[in-house]
Amino acid sequence: LEYRKGVLDLVESMKTVIESIPKAKLVMIGKGPLLSRVIKKVADLKLQKHIEVRGFTSCKELLDASLRASIFVLPSYYEGMPTVALEAMACQLAVVATAVRGTTEIVKHGETGVLVPPRAPKSLGHAIIHLLEHPDLRLELAKSGRRLVEEKFTWDKVTERTLTAYNAATG
């Protein structure tokens, strides 16, 4: 939970989500320098019934939470290669993410997820609402994301591309 991940925007976006879907719940998993600020913002916005901040969890708990989730949200301000989005896609979750370099290489708007501008909590909230209200679209995006991971991002595929690049460079 750090600034560049946009976690405070995610908390803020839940105000918009709750207005339309009062039973919606956000589970935030992770640790980092903003943990106490996230908890305070949740309290300040009176969203404790809607946002659970778990902090650090084991891999098993993270996988269990991912398999129970409906949507994965990545509101980053910038990314390299967002492995966490690939992990969510591997769990066949629909992804809502900010349109930042790195993320846009794997999340294609309307194909493998939904993209919104960074630093736009209302847009983020509306994208979450849209997917929660359209389960068929959510399932279609989740399946496309899973297919992308299987086609391009398994360890075998990544190893193959790495070896090909290495062989070409040392040729």
Image: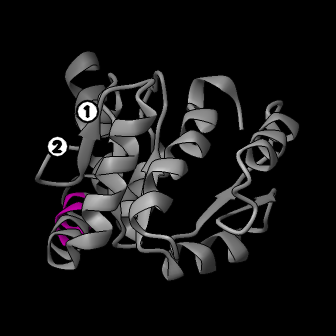
The x, y position of residue 93, in whole percent, is 36, 68
Marks 2 and 1, Cα distance to the nearest angstrom?
6 Å
Which residue is under mark 1?
104
Mark 2 residue crowding within 10 angstroms, few (<14) / some (14–19) / many (20+)? some
Q: Is residue 159 visible?
A: no
Q: Are marks 2 and 1 in contact (CB under 8 Å)?
A: yes
The x, y position of residue 56, in whole percent, is 81, 56
In which quadrant is the C terminus drawn? top left
Mark 1 residue crowding within 10 angstroms, few (<14) / some (14–19) / many (20+)? some
The residue at the point 25 percent across, 69 percent down is 142
SS state under label 2: loop
The residue at the point 32 percent across, 37 percent down is 162
**Taking 32 as reference, is 12 left or right?**
left
Which residue is under mark 2?
108
Q: Is residue 82 one of those drawn in magenta? A: no
The x, y position of residue 3, in whole percent, is 66, 24
The answer to which of 128 and 168 lies nearer the viewer is 128
What range is drawn magenta here? 143-148
